[in-house]
Image (cartoon, helix red, strand yellow):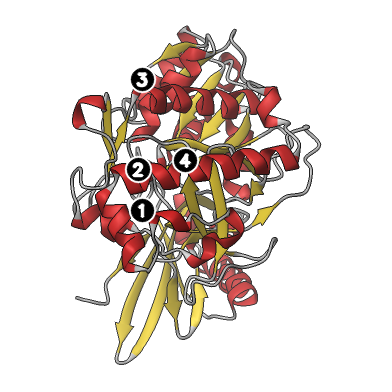
Amino acid sequence: MWQPEIEAMGRDALRYLQEDRFRQVWAHIWDDAPVQRGLLRDAGAERGDAPSLDGISKLPFTDKKAFTEHYPFGLFAVPREKVIRLHSTSGTTNKPSMGGYTVSDMQNWKDLIARICAAAGVTGGDTAQVAFGYGMFTGGFGLHQGLEQMGVTILPMSSGQTEKQLMMMRDIGPTVLVSTPSYALYLSEAVREAGIKGEIKLRVGLFGGEGHTPEMAAKIEENLGITATSNYGLCELGGPGLSGECLERKGLHIAEDHYYCEIIDSETGEVLPEGETGELVVTSLTREALPLIRYRTKDITRLTYEPCACGRTHARMAPVIGRSDDMLIIRGVNVFPSQIESVLIRQEHIGPHYMLVVRREGVTDTLEVQVELVDGSVLESFPMLEQIQGSIREQIRNILGLTVKVTLVAPQSVERFMGKARRVKDERGK
C-alpha cells in the first residue's frame, strides 16, 4: 500500500475523517464558491445548516450542465493565481468541463495515483509506457506524475505511433502499460500479429478513461501476458485516482478519505442501498480549486463495503457497466454496449471490434451489431456466416430479450480508436 495508515483505516475512524472534511468543504463553498453557494441557497439551505453525511441526500445535485453554464472558471473556489494546472474534458458535444488544481490538489492527486498503481502491483523499480494522450485529458499527466512520485521510470509515449510503441516495448522493456483499454486491445493485437509477445517484459496494465468488460480484459491479458487492472476518475472530480483495482480484482477501491460516494436511481434521484446498481454520485472532500457536492457522474455501477482480502478497508465500486446517458432503449429494452461486448468477445471467428448502429424504421427503433471477422475467408462460406450470426443473435436475445440484426464485416474494417472507443452510431436523426 502507498498510504497504509489511510488505506487500511478502520471504518469508524474513516467516517469521522469524512465528516470532518465535509464540514470543511461546506464552509469553503459558502465562503468562496458563489455558484455552488447559489445552488444550495436555491434548494433552501443556509451556511449554518451543514448536514452530516447521513443527511447529504437532502442536498441538490451538481451536474455537467453547471460546468457548461459557468464555463470556463465559474465553479472555481480559489483565485485564479492559486490555480497551477488546468485540465478539461474533450467537449465533443458542448463546452468542455474545466478542472483546476492548487498546489495541495496536485499533491493529493499524485498520492491518489500512487495508491492505485501500488494496488495494481507497481513498484519503484518498474518502467511505465504511458500510452494515454497527453494534453487537456487528465489521464496522461495524471498517471505520469503519480508513477513518477513512486520512483517509476516513465516512457511518455502518448497514444498513436503503434510501430514505435512496439519498438519501445522490445528495446526499452517497460513492465507497465498505461492506456485506455480499447487502445491496449489494439496494441495487444499488434503484438500478437508481430509475433513479439516473448520479447516484451510487460506485466501490469493500468487501464482507464473508459469502461471495459472482463472479457476484453482477458483478451488483452492473453495477448500481452499481463495482469490487467482498471482505474477510474473524472476531470470534474480531479481525474484518475478516485478508485482503482487491487490484485484481488473484486472491485475498484474508492479513496473514501477524498470522496464520498452514493448510488442513486437515475430517474428518481433516490439513494439506493448497498449492492444495488444505479448512478454514481460523488462529493469531493479535499479539493480546493473545485469542490463539488453530489456530482452526478452518469456512470452506472454499485458499491460494497465488505472487507477486501488485500487488507484495504475503503468501499469498492463494481466496474462501470455503462452511462445513464449512453444507455440505448430499443423497443422498451435497456441496452448497454458492454452487455453486447461480453457476448461478442467470447465468440469464435470474430474479433473484439464492433459498432452498434441504431436506426428508426417507421416508429420502431432497430439495432444492428456490426462485428469484425478474424479471417476474411469466412465471408465466402455462407453456411458458416449463418451459423456465426445465428449464435450471436441467440446469445444477445437470451441476455437482453431483444432480437438484433447481426452483420459480419471484413477484418480491419471497423474503426480503431487511439483514445476512448466510440461504439454507438445513432442514425435515427438522419
- Residue contact at pointers 1 and 2, CB within 8 angstroms: yes
Dot label at residue 24: 4
Task: Give the residue number, with chain letter if any, for mark 1.
Answer: 422
Q: Residues within 10 Å of mark 2 (few under 14, many from 20)?
A: some
Does residue 379 appear to the left or right of 92 in the view shown?
A: right
Dot label at residue 417: 2
The residue shown at (44%, 68%) is: 327
**Considering the image in quadrants, where does the C terminus appear?**
bottom left
The residue shown at (37%, 34%) is: 288
Q: Which amino acid, mark 2?
A: Phe
Task: Give the residue number, with chain letter if any, for mark 3.
Answer: 157
The residue shown at (20%, 25%) is: 81
Using the image as rendered, state which of residue 189 and residue 303 is in the foreground: 303
Q: Which amino acid, mark 4?
A: Gln
Q: Residues within 10 Å of mark 1 (few under 14, many from 20)?
A: some
Q: Residues within 10 Å of mark 3 (few under 14, many from 20)?
A: many
Does residue 397 appear to the left or right of 284 in the view shown?
A: right
> Tag 1 or tag 4, which sits nearer the N-term?
4
Q: Position of residue 211 (x, y in %)?
A: 50, 49
Rounded to the nearest angstrom, the CA distance separating label 3 from label 2 is 16 Å
Q: Nearer the viewer, mark 4 or mark 1?
A: 4
Q: Which amino acid, mark 1?
A: Arg
